Image (tube, rainbow, N blue to C red):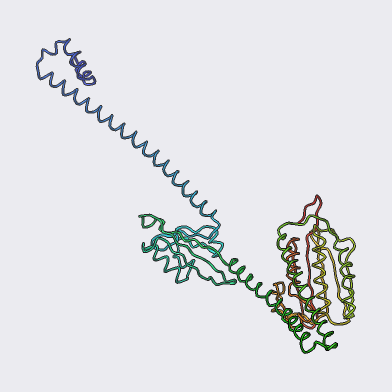
Amino acid sequence: MSPLDWRAIGLLFLPVPAVLAVLAGTSVLAVGPAVIGAVLASGGIALGVARIRGRIDEAQQIESLNEAELHEEFVRQSRLAESYETILDAVPEPLLVLRRDRRVLHANRAIIDLLGHDPLDADLTAAIRHPEVIAATAAVLTGKAEERTIEFQRGGAIEQSLVARLVALPNGRADGPAAVLVLHDLTLIRKATEMRSDFVANVSHELRTPLTAIVGMIETLRGPAKKDAVARERFLALMEEQGSRMTRLVGDLLSLSQIQANEHARPTDTVRVQDILPTVARMLEPHAEKKKVSFSIEVDSDLPVVLGDADQLQQAFQNLMHNAVKYGRDGSVIRVVGRGEGRDGIAVSVIDQGEGIPEQHLPRLTERFYRVDKARSRALGGTGLGLAIVKHIVTRHQGRLSIESEEGVGSTFTVSLPVKREGGARD
């Protein structure tokens, strides 16, 4: 191959201006326009190839950038989804996120705990079957209402009062979130309202009865029995009894109110329960002698000390032992047994030999003004608040009160208290 041929081949890889410059310095131009056209055509092919390669490289760079952007977007969306679930699970109220087809898109931890299962991807009726809630959900999901609030009762072992609030979400996707359903538990509020109403009614009734009796006796003393010395003495004794009953009632109410006000403040003093129990027995001796009842204090002298309020613990054991005197049989023995419960606590049981309490009454004995036999309780001077006071005192001391009873045999009231541990800590 001649040098001219090699030069022509090399020109294919040079830009057009360079080709012309090379040709201008040789005799190739002399061969005529055909050669020049061929050379120019070859240069055009090279330029086209270069452009194609440039576009391929550019496309590859764009594809690489797109892959990086897609990966970054995927990571960002994954993190958003995790944050979304974490935030919803942190909401203390039970919450459901619904799609337009009424299926559950997300259920937070609170509603899973409430239902006992995860209704994810199930129809709303798997979580809530109340017809009014279902109808309100349909109205929100179809756009007939922006939000709805429905109060309903949920059955079960314990009936609950709930409020369901539904709010629509702006979203055009059929499979995206369309509404949020939040449940608010009003059970405790409803119970507190009922208890408050019952409490006011009970207090009014408890005070009205002795007040009515006193007013009636005063009218009698001013009228028909004005000059009857025997009737006057009898009525004055009854008035004193009713006045004392009201005094005890007011005193118990004030005591209960004070205990409840300080129920969350844990006591810090050290108390020896084995020293309190004999003191309480001596205080109740006048009442015990009237019924010929005696106390048997069976408490270990080496019981560990507890962190507590000595006055309140004395009041709690006094109420229990006084009840044992009132409701125990005449001439019986009331046992007060104190023992250790491992390394963590002690237990004090007040055991009477009374008529016993029917089983259906046991869960309600610590309610305010609850009485198994109202007439007998009032006749014995009870206010219906003694066991409620005991319960709140024991609760403040982080203990528990348990009641066992057998009809015809007697009842056992046990107070369990945590002991003081080394370094001032307690269980």
Q: Is residue 373 visible?
A: no
Find residue 70 and report its image quarter. top left
Percent of width and height locating residue 305: 84, 58
Residue 231 shown left or right of residue 109 in the figure? right
Q: Quadrant of the C terminus?
A: bottom right
Find residue 179 and report its image quarter. bottom left
Residue 131 shown left or right of residue 327 in the figure? left
Find residue 365 and report its image quarter. bottom right
Nearer the observer, 174 or 144: 144
State whether residue 161 is above or below residue 227: above
Percent of width and height locating residue 342: 81, 61
Q: Quadrant of the N terminus?
A: top left
Q: Residue at x 80, y 59 (%)?
A: 309
State whether residue 185 is above or below residue 45: below
Percent of width and height locating residue 105: 44, 58
State whether residue 193 is above or below residue 28: below
Q: Residue at x 40, y 60 (%)?
A: 146
Nearer the observer, 377 or 355: 377
Q: Is residue 58 visible?
A: yes
Percent of width and height locating residue 324: 82, 76
Count of numbered marks: 0
Nearer the observer, 127 or 416: 416
Residue 22 shown left or right of residue 142 in the figure? left
